[in-house]
Amino acid sequence: MAQTEIDDISTDSSLVDPEKDLLGHASFAKYLADSICKMTFPEGFVIAVYGSWSSGKSTLLNFLVHYLQQKPDESQPIIVPFNPWLFSGHQDITRSFFEQLQNVLSKQGSVSKGLRERIADFAKVISEIPLPYAQTGRAVATLFDDKEKEASEFKEELEDTLEQQQQRIVVTIDDIDRLPANDIRQLLRIFKAIPNFTNVVYVLVFDKEVVMKTIAESKEISGKAYLEKIIQVAFELPIPEKISLRRLLFEKLDGIFADTEKQLFDQIHWDNIYFQGIDHFIINLRNIVHLTETLTVTYPAVKGEVNPVDFIALESLRVFCPMVYDTIIHNPHAFVGEVNTSIDELKNLHNAWIAQLRDEDKQPIKNLLMHLFPKLKLVWGNSNLDEEQLKWREQLRVCSLEIFPIYFRLTFSTSELSNTQIKAILALAEDADKFGEQLIKVANQKRLDGTTQLITFIEQFENYSEQEIPLNCIPSIVLTLFDVGEELLCAEEKSQSIFNLGNEVRISRFILRLLRRLEEPVRFEVLKKAITQGKALAIINHEIATLKEQQSQYADTFNLEEEWLVNAQHLKELEEIATKRQQSTDINDK
């Protein structure tokens, strides 16, 4: 990679101009720059600033460089930026470091020709030493092979020349924590091997926990102790205050939504949405970066067609609570449109998925959703719908059934039921009537391939644990399937393939899987009640045929009686009930 390319690359979304500082890093950077220029030390000095990813480490380093470059000529240091992450995987880190040092110093007229020559000679020797030296753990002064003595001599000459160098050299190193483990260890060996390079200050910024863990994995010494041997002074970058985070987020949002029509922005609506919902999730710089980068991509596709406040709120859910975002996409009529079901049913549906959230997230998400979807005030707010429904379309609100789909243009469509939807339906399992109604709705929902969602619903149950389908729900589920089963056998799902499973088979497999969790006497009672009361004779007959198949003449041969769902006597009784039901139906049909 060419040096000009490297210099042009900025780290993530870090700031360069201290005038734009919103997190209080500029003041620290200014005073640190003063100290670096004025401090006296006998040999090389290493300063570290610790901070987690997206805590503003790179911004702080940029500010430091800015202030160092503002120093008067007589005290301005030579700045050598080195980002090892840009070289990782391409070449040896140690070699790259000295080549970068040589490259910068060669452009400085104030640097003596002797120093430039010593750096070039040392870099040349390093580049000629076989790469395996980097894994030996030895100091640069004790390198092996024929170059060992030569490297040691050049190193001493370089140290003597640096001691005579009047202008201070500041080496800034970023992104150490983004390196692979081997590269981190190799880079740290540079500082351990050349601590007496006089008049050189190293400023490192990285995530201490990541680097310490990497060191500890390969050394007997703890990561903390190892860093203390290398680093003379370390600072912990504080977590930004909430007010600073808000200012930074709002500034970035101003840039993304700069051309949005002002009449679409309702300040009161934004205040409610942000402070009662979104603000809960903005706890560090990483959250701001993730949200604003997402909006940078998604907003242009819907600009002018959606309400900006509603869109920010929904994209916040996409970023911070994808399960809730997924629930909205797959259940639009539970959030928008007229209330075409009972309030209790609506409450059961929403309470089922809200129960899956972390306790601390539940209320902020409820608040956010009630402001986005007034329909939910009937569920959690105990109040009537707003009387401004006619304005929702005009304001391009997401609660308008007509506008709703526009908000999800950059969402991959899926013909599958979400895990949240299935759990919401399961929450109704104890009530056979409501559970049956939901199954019928699922059976009438078309997938992209022309079949219905019932296939997905039944087949995905095989992935559910026993805890997700409690024992006390099994009788109700089985009764429901025997009752509404014929409404689930849709003609559209018949296939010309001889290998395709029909819904009778899918439902039967589902019933068998559930019943096997019960003891045989309980299974029998559940089946007896379901066959006696159920209306789906096709399911009843299919189930009897399946049970008879289990007890066929071949089952005796292989002694598989313990695998039977019910014993022979119970099967005979069930078959008699089913026969009477069928005969009664035949008579009535005549």
Image (spheres, rainbow, N blue to C red):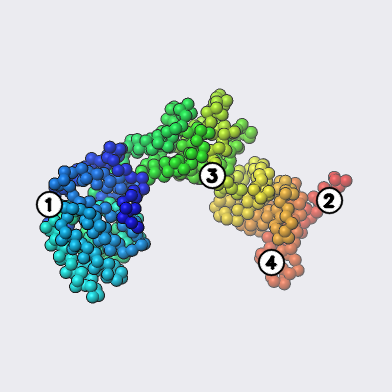
Q: Of marks 3 and 1, which one's residue comes earlier in the chain?
A: 1
- Identify the mark at residue 561; answer none if there is no mark: 4
Neighbor class of circle 4 (other Cα within 10 Å; few <14, some 14-19, many 20+) is some
Q: Is residue 105 left or right of residue 239?
A: left
**Percent coordinates x, y for residue 430 in the rendering:** 62, 45
Which residue is identified by label 2? Answer: 583
Label 2 element class: helix
Q: Of marks 4 and 3, which one's residue comes earlier in the chain?
A: 3
Mark 3 and 1 residues: CB-CB less than 8 Å, in contact? no
The residue located at (75%, 59%) in the rendering is 545
**Which amino acid, mark 4?**
Glu
Which residue is identified by label 1? Answer: 40
Q: Mark 4 or mark 3, which is nearer to you? A: 3
Which residue is identified by label 3? Answer: 411
- Identify the mark at residue 440; answer none if there is no mark: none
Give me the C-alpha separation between circle 2 and circle 1: 104 Å
The residue located at (35%, 35%) in the rendering is 247
| Residue 355 appears in the rendering | no
**Which amino acid, mark 3?**
Thr
Q: Is residue 301 left or right of residue 40?
A: right
Q: Of marks 2 and 1, which one's residue comes earlier in the chain?
A: 1
Q: Quadrant of residue 88?
A: bottom left
Vertical comparison of 496 with 453: above or below: below
**Which amino acid, mark 1?**
Thr
**Percent coordinates x, y for residue 245 in the rendering:** 35, 38
Give me the C-alpha separation between circle 4 and circle 3: 51 Å
**Percent coordinates x, y for residue 429 in the rendering:** 62, 45
Give me the C-alpha separation between circle 4 and circle 2: 30 Å
